[in-house]
Image: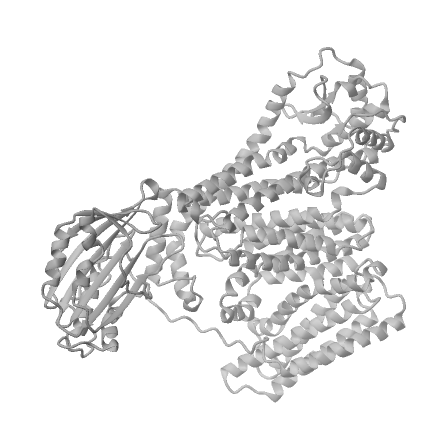
Amino acid sequence: MTRTDGQPPAAPVVRGPAGPPTPLLWLYLQVVGLVGAVGVAVGSMFFYGNRPLAQPYREAMLRCARAHDVDPSVPAEFDATRTMQFLTCMSDPARVRGLVMLTGGVLLVVGLALIVVLTPVVDRWRLRHHRLASPVAGAAQRFADLCDRQGLHGRHRPELFVAGPSVRQAFTTVRPGGRPLVVLPAAVAVAYRDPARFDPVVQHELAHVRGRDVRWVSAVRGLLWLVVPAVAVASVSETRAVGLPEITVVTAGRALVLVLVSALLRALVLRLREHEADQQVSRSGDATALVRLLEAAAATRPHHPGRLRRLFARHPTPQRRAAALRAGQQVSVDGPMQAAVTGAVTAVVAGAVAQAANALALDRDLSVLPASLVGVLLGFGLTPALHRRALTGAPSRRWLPIVAAAAGLAVGGFLFPTGTTDGGASFPTGTNSLGISLWFAILAALASMVAVTACTVLAGLAARRGLDRFTRLRRGLTYLTAAATVTAICWPLPALAVGLEWPVSIRAWLVYALPDAPWPWLGLALPTAVVALIGWRRLATRAALSVMAVTGLIGASLASAQALTNPPATLDAAVALLQQREWICALAGWAAFVVLALGRGDPGVGRALVAGVGVAALTGTSQFVHQVVSGRTVDATLLRLYVGVPVIWWFYLAVLTTPVLIGLSALAGRLGQRPDPIGRPARRSGTRARVWQVLAPVTAALLVGAAALVGLPGGPVPLPTAAPATTAPAAVGVPSPTTVAPSANASPGTRTGADPGRMLTVAEAGAAAGAVRAKLPAFWKPEPQQQDTGESRSVVKPAACRQLATDDYLRRIKPDRRVDEIRGFATRKTPSSISGSTVIVIVTSYAHPVPDTLLDEAEVARAACTRFTATAPGGAPVRFTVSAQPAPQVGEESWRVRYDLASGSGSSKITGTTLYGLVRLGHNLVVVQLTAIAEPPDEAVFEAAVASTVTALSG
């Protein structure tokens, strides 16, 4: 779109069609990915907000959690075997949730496609009211000449539409059939005899046509039309599900940030599109006329928007466009905003895909899917921009896109913390934990800094070779290598995010599972591509070979000496020795990498990567040969342990160190002296001296560290022990009435030796109250309880029911010395379900016998009240229906009542049941209360609690 104010004096010189425009397709694909990610999140919220879908899922989660005694939210109780059994149990219900999430993503993408299809129809309807009454024949002829010079023919040749005075800006759209349509204001069309005013405007619009993205841009303009309503629907759905007071700041913040990222992406794409069209005009003709036209427009409307407004502006100001053309800036490949938005969208899309895929295949490890998606988006989305940036010859601030992309990925990681969701219904990720979101954001920022650094190094290496017949091949190799390297870097991220809650487990995973997986081996594409881009001759310098020889010799000697001087006597000692030798080999390669990367005037990071992996592999090979000579059988496992593991550990050490090395170089000002990562040494003798000056302290550190090292930092990691074999229990109901057999006729249980004819001690009363623990299934866990001895402040209606509702009849017992002990047990609560049961046992022992009229008074209170409503201060009213129940046949006298309760109405209605029983036994009174919310009460658990407590009090 071009402003048309002003009259520049000079006419442009049209040269003919320029080269193809800078491709922006990957930016449009980011728009599609962002819309799909929002759709996945909205689908998840719809699933949880729809009771017919969510209720079976919650019941299945409760059933599986109880069946396998799993509560992953408690790190101390994590068990891999039971967790896998739980995931297998939940695979079918989770698949339904995954399909709903996937449907949400598809529907929003289809909505975006409808916007693309319908926008031409809407534009046609709008333009029919703005057509100029009389055609401008000269303008049409001049327009056709410019189209011919730009090589636009056939279906790609645009049509001209001259609009009336109400249209002040030129723009390009498409007709319903797909043919481009250039709309010119009448003020421009009538100036066709003045090429200085007519030609720049038309050339700018034809540049949009040559970019072949006129239809795509409709999707960009309509991005917020989909994202904002979708976020609003998700927020309303969550409000209905949990209530407005429960909407957390984290959830609201995520929704706001998601809208901001969408707005930034839309503004970025539209601004880059305008700048790229200006660059096309500059490349195909004289840009002076366009610059003067823009300056004239800026003078007519001297508007200077603020920084925040410029960030979200869909069009750059005429002043900025003119300044970019005068300076010859490639705005489309410069600036940190592109890296930041790309990083944020990458993290959001990868997180959404990971959540949908994990739901569709809950019992499978799909961690490589989001990692590979990040690799593709950064490798083929951001690396080309970094490559074009390096080609401009001014990469002195190459740390800027690294930091920007890290910030963007941190924002995306906050929105979609992959692998850390707690299974709830919080938009958009399922977790409302601020700690989880921030922790994953920090991990994503660190991982992205490492990944983008690797992409920057590769882009610099590819740009160094210049343009020749192999340029396209090198670019393709660079992008593929970047994608593979980023995949290897990001693959451990979900495991680290989850495993950091269990430090012992994550250390075992790093030592055993990480090197055994195939995906880290993708990282070796990085040094392989360096060899292809630089060539062996430029790599194998005398300085590099000497550093490799020294560090390799030191590492191999230390590892072999460790094996000879400390022969293992036990399996644990053998494992510790193996880890020491692997770690020494990896450190030797890392030392060579650091020495060559820091050597002033030396080859830099590219050559250091090849040297480091070579040292790690050769040192590991020496240990492999040592084992073969010692009599070990040669097999693939032995080769993997002594060669593969050090190489993998070296790779992660190297990529983690690379941003630090580039940062140190930037602080030292070396990037300005040596802008490329593969510069040749200026003076061979001086270089060699400086290399050895750096090598000496690093080698000393390697010697001291290896001598005191025991495996990985923190001590050797023992072999992971398999979880105890457990037989999968039968399917458990919610809850199963056969979970616990009634204890009236069952085994007598634990006897405390208590005498019901006297007041019990605190220990005896506590043992009796806790006797039911042995009778409960595994998914029942102790839950601390406090007995309410004060006056109840709840409002009970009708007032006649207050005695029953507040247990006033128990307070009529004569105050005297007594012992009160209370024990509580509850079923595991799943994050996405309110279902659960609690059993409370209270044993009260008095200095005198319990009055035999107590239970009669309780029955009188029950008979006087069949329904009542109780409202706690600040709470919602709870409706109770009272019914008599057969008393348990235990103790001297017993009594039982049932309360069916309900709160709320409609889709937010919550129901429950309370079974309440009293047993009198000499000086002791037993109170058993079982409350089940959103599930049937387990009669067997209630009877077991009564029977086991009475048995324990029976002496």
Residue 77 shows up from this direction: yes
Report the front residue among 41 and 21.
41
Establish if 674 lies above or below 622: above
In x, y percent, where is residue 283? 83, 36
Establish if 618 lies above or below 740: below
In percent of the image, x 35 and y 60: which residue is there?
A: 828
Establish if 592 lies above or below 69: below
In x, y percent, where is residue 48? 41, 46
Looking at this view, name the residue that lies furthest to the bottom: 565
In x, y percent, where is residue 375? 63, 53
Report the front residue among 748 and 113.
748
Q: Which of the image's four quarters has the N terminus?
A: top right
In percent of the image, x 25 and y 74: which residue is there?
A: 767
In percent of the image, x 58 and y 83: which residue is there?
A: 631
- Where residue 199 sits, quadrant-wise, is top right
- Where residue 446 sits, quadrant-wise, is bottom right
Looking at this view, name the residue that lies furthest to the front: 815
Q: Is residue 728 left or right of residue 252?
A: left
Establish if 915 lies above or below 311: below
Q: Is residue 802 left or right of residue 907?
A: left
- Where residue 26 sits, quadrant-wise, is top right
Q: How has the structure been colored for display?
A: one colour
Report the front residue among 495 and 459.
495
In percent of the image, x 19 and y 55: which residue is there?
A: 803
In x, y percent, where is residue 651? 65, 66
Q: Which of the image's four quarters has the C terminus?
A: bottom left
